[in-house]
Image: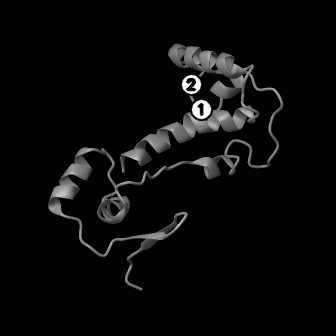
Amino acid sequence: MTGRFVLIIKTEDDFIFFNDEKDITPEFAEIYKANSDMAHINDWGKITYGMLKTFPQEKVAVKGSCSEVGRCYWYPDGKHKAHLTEEDLLLMENGWYELKFIREAIGKWHESIKENSFNYLLMDLYYWEHRMGSWQAQSQLE
């Protein structure tokens, strides 16, 4: 085992192969590191470089985090609380209840989705907005 990896993506009419067999150029590494405070140059950087060199320029890659919601992070027993209050949401993170600006932001968010949660469970939407928003923002940089 060489420690190298290959990512294969199936498109409608073909397969696209990305690999890390080519070394990242110093120029690419400099730009990559300059655009992400926590750059993972030896793994995500290699994937990104492989995509840059092999991904068809006329195509668009879409990243996402749908499967993360399925983990039920805040209710691992699979039992979702039927009615969540703003206080319930605030108490999920230590110290949030004491911070007025966070209480106000959570209150506005909670109010905005009361009538239209798109048939998602509130806890899943909150996880997606709060936890995955931060993680995906970093992920999209790489």
Instruction: Report x, y in % for residue 37.
Output: 30, 44
Give me the disc on residue 93. Answer: 1
> Measuring 81% from the left and 26% from the top, which residue is drawn there?
83
Instruction: Report x, y in % for residue 47.
Output: 37, 63
Instruction: Report x, y in % for residue 141.
Output: 36, 45
Left/right of residue 135 with respect to residue 40 in the rendered view: right
Left/right of residue 4 with respect to residue 82 in the rendered view: left
Instruction: Check whether the beta carbons of the residues at disc 2 and disc 1 lie within 8 A of each other.
Output: yes
Check disc 2 and report the residue beneath it.
Answer: 96
Q: Amino acid at mark 1?
A: Glu
Q: Is residue 31 above or below residue 74?
A: below
Give me the disc on residue 65. Answer: none
Q: Amino acid at mark 2?
A: Trp
Left/right of residue 48 with respect to residue 108 in the rendered view: left
- Decide which of 50, 94 is in the foreground and name it: 50
> Measuring 32% from the left and 52% from the top, which residue is drawn there?
39
Q: Label 1's element?
A: loop
> Measuring 62% from the left and 48% from the top, which residue is drawn there?
66
> Measuring 25% from the left and 50% from the top, which residue is drawn there?
33
Please, which residue is most extreme toward the bottom here? 1
